[in-house]
Image (cartoon, rainbow, N blue to C red):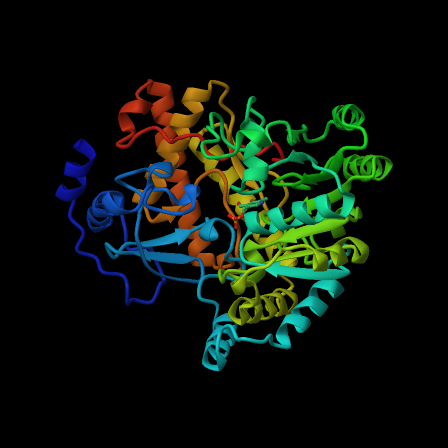
Amino acid sequence: MDVICKIFLLSSTHDARFRPFTRSVMTATTHSVARSFEIYERARELIPGTSQLISRRPSRAALGVSPIYAERAKGCRIWDVDGNEYVDWMSAVGPIVLGYADDVVDTAVKEQIDRGSVYSIVHENSLALAETLVRLIPSAEMVRYCKGGGEACTMAVRIARGFTGRDKVLFCGYHGWHDWYLAANLGSEGLQGHLFNGIDPIGVPAALEGTIEPFEYGDLDQLESQLKANDGRVACIIMEPMRTEMPPSGYLEGVRELADRHGAVLIFDEVSCGWRVSLGGVQEVAGVTPDISVFAKAISNGYPMAAVVGRRDIMATSERMFISSAYWDDNVGIAAAIATIGELERRDAPAVFKRLGSDFRARIDRAASEAGLAASCVGVDAHPGIRFDIDDPDTARLVTSVFVQENARRGLILSTGFFFNCGHEDVTALDHTERVVTETFALIAEGLERGDLASRLDTQVQEDSFRRMVS
Ligand SMILES: Cc1ncc(COP(=O)(O)O)c(C=O)c1O
């Protein structure tokens, strides 16, 4: 209740919504999210969790300080319903790769809307997109579409099970919300380290227990012993090939070899890593070709779209399987994907992200050293993360919470994990980010030194964010 009162007492007379976005209009003292919070209170009565993606739940940011409801977005910026302007590094938790409301993609989408979204028959563009994916992605010989990442993983696993006639799945990383995956927490805590801890698989059929097992990223011996223990029963190995670090040398080659030796289909889930490191996926950079790969999120710059691509003989099996849904032939997502991939190629997006990442890293590291805080930017340039060198998990969570809160107060949506988009190549946004992070780091350093950091947090300590084994 304290938090709510505080919010309503703070005044915000700024309305940045229709101003050119040349600078942040906010300071830590004028920032208010009163209108957001008022909507949130009403939404809680009608929408369980208030958002559909857990990572977008207000309770996962600095509740009462972070913005909750957006009014609009453009490039790398979001305006909330209170009129606050933010430089946003979350890129909608991954789908935005060119920048919000990209002109080229949105023109293609509007033109498609004018011609109709989904028909009783299909559109030739579905072939045009398939041809593009086959040209760019090493593992792509045939292509199927759907709408989301978890759904695409589910399709890939179904195809692998259908192709091999086997049931068992070995997995590493995060692959969505469906029964086949959450079954890993039936009778054990299989998702621990791959997602966040303590997920109760409520509603997942108990009969699925034992159908899926996790394996640890980087440990070929463990994977081999699991394959041996399940000899002749493993349908597929599904994994995120990387997150923020490139795969250790020889690791993916080793997984490929083990999958071949045991007759398991190898699936790379490139939902989060795809399109940023290379347009052919991590598989192109690593030089290891899986049997099936899954792309979603950034494929279409924010319009629902996903693709499952893979080896001809395996993918062709899906024609005989019941894998079917009305909106998977939707032409808006297909038009968005064609335009997005075209722009990613034209702008040489992987080079943009490399350049951007190296600039971002230098700025974060400089902010840390100026503030005297043990923090750094880690991982590959195209998709790094921010790390606080703090051993105690409770203190680490507190530090992250204060980081998110103080950034939000100053017009910055930035936590320790984030996604670049091409709109971030904007010196004003980068300067603003560096200035804010330097202030936030200094506040954290002071709080740690004086032992009063907890008193600087006006919200709850953040819940565990998604923990990725592959990070
Ligand atoms: C690697 C990976 N796979 C699957 C998913 C699920 O995608 P969606 O949220 O579109 O269902 C995600 C989402 O973050 C992801 O990162």
* Residue at (39% x, 35% y) in the render: 403
The quarter of the rendered structure image containing the C terminus is: top right
On screen, 106 above or below 88?
below
* Residue at (28% x, 41% y) in the render: 65
Q: Is residue 13 visible?
A: yes
On screen, 269 above or below 446?
below
The quarter of the rendered structure image containing the N terminus is: top left
On screen, 293 above or below 178?
below
Q: Nearer the viewer, residue 216 or 184?
A: 184
Residue 37, percent from left and from top: 23, 45
* Residue at (53% x, 47% y) in the render: 360
Q: Is residue 273 visible?
A: no
Find residue 311 and report its image quarter.
bottom right
Residue 81, percent from left and from top: 26, 56
Residue 31, percent from left and from top: 24, 47
Residue 280, percent from left and from top: 71, 57
Q: Residue furthest right?
A: 261
Q: Is residue 394 left or right of residue 133?
A: left
Q: Is residue 370 left or right of residue 171?
A: left
Q: Nearer the viewer, residue 78 or 112?
A: 112
Q: Nearer the viewer, residue 422 or 315?
A: 315
In this rendering, the count of numbered labels is: 0
Q: Is residue 378 left or right of residue 140?
A: left
